[in-house]
Image (spheres, coloured by chain):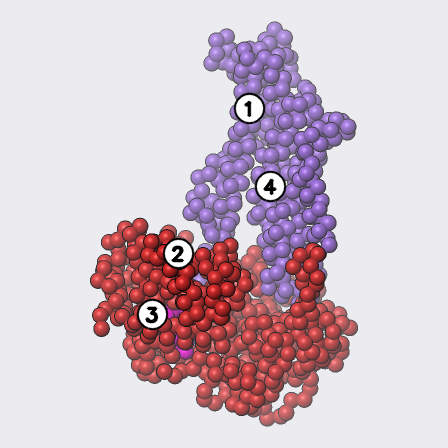
């Protein structure tokens, strides 16, 4: 029996793959066009946000009533010192768009993080403990889904008073359901697997099991939802600002810029189109990155 | 006899991150009408790939080529996909898969699924198809076939579903039936019935049969010829008798030596000293599950365990044997503290289990689970997985823990270079070794192994059983081995407890129970176990 053992074991060893999960991940990442485009866009926008003071040609708050409503440089009457023209108050549009990136990114990341903390905490607790706790949290979910989100957000911002931190908090508090649904289902599945049973038999407490055994397995799906929620939160901020209860003037925010450009939309369409393009690029970048991450981290390797 | 299937130099490549993988190499096979061919091999040997290539069911990333691939004189690769699925897959070649739980569609009735293929192809009217389906269900041994036609898959047991699958493939009267591990997911007594059925049907209808299995004993009894596959190649091919009793290739010999056998001397000599020290005692354990179908339906109780008493003595291997649903796994989970008994007492080294703190219980008894693919956290490295019980016990010295991990890995004969790999990089046998290393790293006195080898290949099973037995001796472990396999019991157990429907039906030393069973049920289990005989 002993020599059987040795020979068969060596054969078994030959079959093991030499790639670590990290290497496979990297390989899939660089083979996924959608992910590369999305991540590239997000990266560029993030760099613009960080380097805003360096990149912006003008002070975004500086008004010059003599230069009001200048068109972009490619239109008739455009000037090279205001490449994308100016707004109603004569502020440089490019500089305002660049500074607006900061607001969008901050609110996107902030609100998606607030939602993540609420949703993942509730989801893991509901999935792990089940029973009445699960029923209670599921009821909370149903209640949240039945609420008209934007209306509630408007009401809340109006009552509390608008500021960037209030907007982050309220948009976050209203966007945790997706995290909850996904983490709850995933936790239920992992909880029934034998490695959790092995941890229980080794004397681990629920807290230790959740942090050490279950959370690492949830990370990939959490990251994916985070990128989706990032896009949703940015749009929510823009909607709120457009409706006048989000970011307050004169802070440059893309949603607010669309709202301000609204009156002049028919004869100065770039006032609306330019921030719209910025929003579109940021949200599509976040969604492409999320889609890509989902494909890359899924075990079956979809779309390969 | 006429050649039904002729495969000449079949090659299959799979795409993988490491470049193309040559999974089937130059396989040459032939099958006559009415003949049964067995293909035996471990997982990854290419046996299923060969069958899938015949049915054009290979994964999309696979490339397949052959000098000749002809079925009943027809050149298969020349056929277009549409023509192939209309005329070959189904009407000429039928296939049965391993997992009867997932191979039937849960939302359609049995009747609809059975008649669909024949009616859609215009071969039978729907009334004629229904009549034929009822006849076939009757033929494969489904009681009340007419009533069953309107039922759904979830209303049937695994064995019944596999019978329905067989009847369904017979609806189109195929000339060749491919059965890919048709009984691996089933209990032994059911396995014997299904294999008998396949054998009878083949003779009755002069069908060709390809039986694919990792279990040599299963294949040997039911086939005329056997092909042994290893690493994508056929290493040996011949009549079943020749391959089994006069194996030429080295690998076949090793495979044969690895199969646990019911005949011959028991694997273990009787202990010299009678063991008296009872370390785990269960008294009158009952476990009742309450379920209800809807919110307002009355509760129904299911007795998973009904007054079970047993004791495990220090240093022995006690086998707990029974079929699925017998309550053996529930008992194991209760002993591990993963589930609570509804009533009854459990004593560990003389103390009631609920008085023992979790940490102490963990230091006394550790589990090894059935499926090594789910019992290891896929996001942790081996070094973390194996050291985890130590960390949970409060030992946080990284260097000392790493040393303990190395020692545990050496004990279970895992090479040290794997210490920083992830479970996904290991084979099933290696994963099970990791699970054993994790169970042993804290030096427990007892191991409870729930079907530790039933998810593994036969050759790997032998190694794991050997390892467990060796560790028991060296570390003076007490082993409780939950299993459904009589041959495993024969090879490794001192004593046996047979369970059925939540009760113990027989208990005694392994030698006595296996040679002179006193209960009918044990006798039936023994009779159903596959043996090395040729019918």
CA distance separating discs 4 and 2: 52 Å
Counting the numbered discs, the total is 4
Classify residue B251 as left or right of residue A210.
left
In the picture of the structure, the residue carrying the numbered disc 4 is: A226
The residue at the point 67 percent across, 57 percent down is B294
Labels 1, 4: one chain: yes
Q: Find the residue positioned furthest to the front.
A: B127
If you read the primary sequence from the N terminus, does the residue marked by circle 2 or circle 3 appear first? 2
Image mark for residue B423: none
Classify B330 as above or below A117. below
In the picture of the structure, the residue carrying the numbered disc 1 is: A276
If you read the primary sequence from the N terminus, does the residue marked by circle 1 or circle 4 appear first? 4
Classify B461 as above or below B386. below
Mark 4 nearby-residue class (10 Å; few <14, some 14–19, many ≥20): many
Chain bearing mark 1 = A
Chain bearing mark 4 = A
In the picture of the structure, the residue carrying the numbered disc 2 is: B126
Image mark for residue B209: 3
The residue at the point 63 percent across, 92 percent down is B274
Residue B78 % position (x, y): 24, 54
Mark 1 nearby-residue class (10 Å; few <14, some 14–19, many ≥20): some
Q: Contact (CB < 8 A) between labels 2 and 3? A: no
Q: Quarter of the image holding residue B229?
A: bottom left
Chain bearing mark 3 = B
């Amino acid at each position: 029996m002993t020599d059987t053992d040795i020979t068969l074991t060596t054969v078994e060893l030959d079959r093991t793959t030499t790639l670590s999960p990290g290497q496979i991940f990297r390989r899939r990442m660089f083979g996924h066009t959608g992910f590369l485009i999305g991540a590239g866009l997000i990266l560029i926008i993030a760099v613009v946000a960080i380097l805003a003071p360096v990149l912006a040609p003008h002070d975004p708050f500086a008004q010059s009533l003599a230069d009001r409503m200048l068109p972009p440089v490619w239109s008739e009457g455009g000037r090279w010192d205001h490449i994308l023209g100016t707004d109603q108050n004569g502020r440089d549009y490019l500089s305002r768009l660049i500074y607006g990136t900061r607001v969008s990114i901050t609110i996107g990341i902030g609100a998606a993080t607030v939602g993540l903390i609420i949703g993942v905490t509730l989801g893991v607790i509901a999935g792990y403990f089940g029973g009445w706790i699960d029923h209670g949290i599921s009821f909370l979910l149903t209640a949240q889904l039945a609420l008209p989100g934007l209306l509630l957000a408007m009401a809340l911002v109006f009552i509390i008073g608008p500021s960037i931190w209030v907007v982050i908090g309220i948009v976050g508090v209203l966007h945790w359901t997706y995290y909850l649904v996904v983490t709850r289902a995933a936790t239920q599945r992992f909880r029934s697997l034998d490695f959790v049973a092995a941890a229980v038999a080794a004397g681990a407490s629920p807290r230790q099991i959740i942090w050490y055994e279950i959370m690492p397995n949830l990370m990939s799906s959490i990251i994916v939802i985070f990128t989706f929620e990032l896009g949703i939160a940015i749009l929510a901020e823009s909607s709120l600002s457009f409706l006048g209860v989000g970011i307050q003037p004169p802070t440059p925010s893309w949603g607010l810029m669309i709202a301000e450009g609204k009156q002049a939309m028919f004869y100065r369409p770039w006032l609306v189109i330019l921030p719209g393009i910025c929003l579109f690029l940021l949200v599509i970048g976040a969604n492409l990155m999320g889609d890509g991450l989902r494909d890359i981290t899924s075990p079956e390797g979809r779309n390969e | 006899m006429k050649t039904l299937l002729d495969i000449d130099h079949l090659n299959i490549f799979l795409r993988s991150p490491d470049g193309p993988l040559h999974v089937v190499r130059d396989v040459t096979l032939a099958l006559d009408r009415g003949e049964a061919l067995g293909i035996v091999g471990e997982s990854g040997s290419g046996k299923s790939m060969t069958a899938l290539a015949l049915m054009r069911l290979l994964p999309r990333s696979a490339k397949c080529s052959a000098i000749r691939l002809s079925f009943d004189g027809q050149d298969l690769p020349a056929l277009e996909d549409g023509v192939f699925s209309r005329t070959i897959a189904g009407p000429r070649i039928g296939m049965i898969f391993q997992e009867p739980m997932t191979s039937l569609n849960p939302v359609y009735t049995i009747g609809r699924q059975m008649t669909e293929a024949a009616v859609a192809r215009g071969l039978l009217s729907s009334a004629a198809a229904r009549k034929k389906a009822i006849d076939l269900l009757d033929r494969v041994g489904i009681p009340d076939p007419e009533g069953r036609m309107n039922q759904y898959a979830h209303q049937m047991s695994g064995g019944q579903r596999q019978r329905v699958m067989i009847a369904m493939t017979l609806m189109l009267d195929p000339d060749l039936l491919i059965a890919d591990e048709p009984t691996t997911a089933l209990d032994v007594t059911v396995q014997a019935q299904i294999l008998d059925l396949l054998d009878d049907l083949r003779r009755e209808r002069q069908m060709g049969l390809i039986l694919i299995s990792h279990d040599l004993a299963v294949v040997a009894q039911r086939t005329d010829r056997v092909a042994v596959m290893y690493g994508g190649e056929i290493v040996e091919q011949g009549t079943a008798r020749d391959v089994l009793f006069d194996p030429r290739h080295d690998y076949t010999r090793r495979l044969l030596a690895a199969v646990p056998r019911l005949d011959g001397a028991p694997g273990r000599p009787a202990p010299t000293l009678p063991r008296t020290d009872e370390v785990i005692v269960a008294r009158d354990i009952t476990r009742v599950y309450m379920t209800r179908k809807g919110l307002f339906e009355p509760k129904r109780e299911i007795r998973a365990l009904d007054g079970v008493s047993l004791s495990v003595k220090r240093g022995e291997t006690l086998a707990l044997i029974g079929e699925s649903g017998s309550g053996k796994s529930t008992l194991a989970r209760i002993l591990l503290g993963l589930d609570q008994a509804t009533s009854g007492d459990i004593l560990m080294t003389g103390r009631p289990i609920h008085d023992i703190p979790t940490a102490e219980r963990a230091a006394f008894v550790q589990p090894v689970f059935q499926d090594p693919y789910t019992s290891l956290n896929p996001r942790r490295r081996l070094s973390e997985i194996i050291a985890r019980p130590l960390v949970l016990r409060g030992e946080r010295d990284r260097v000392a823990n790493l040393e303990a991990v190395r020692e545990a890995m050496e004990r279970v004969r895992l090479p040290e270079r794997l210490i920083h790999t992830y479970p996904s990089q290991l084979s099933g046998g290696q994963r099970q070794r990791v699970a054993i290393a994790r169970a042993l790293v804290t030096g427990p006195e007892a191991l409870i192994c729930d079907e530790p080898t039933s998810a593994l290949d036969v050759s790997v099973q032998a190694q794991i059983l050997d390892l467990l037995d060796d560790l028991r001796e060296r570390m003076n472990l007490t082993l409780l081995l939950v299993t459904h396999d009589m041959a495993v019991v024969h090879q490794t157990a001192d004593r046996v407890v047979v369970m059925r429907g939540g009760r113990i039906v027989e208990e005694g030393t392994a030698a006595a129970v296996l040679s002179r069973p006193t209960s009918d049920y044990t006798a039936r289990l023994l009779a159903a176990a596959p043996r090395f005989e040729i019918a």
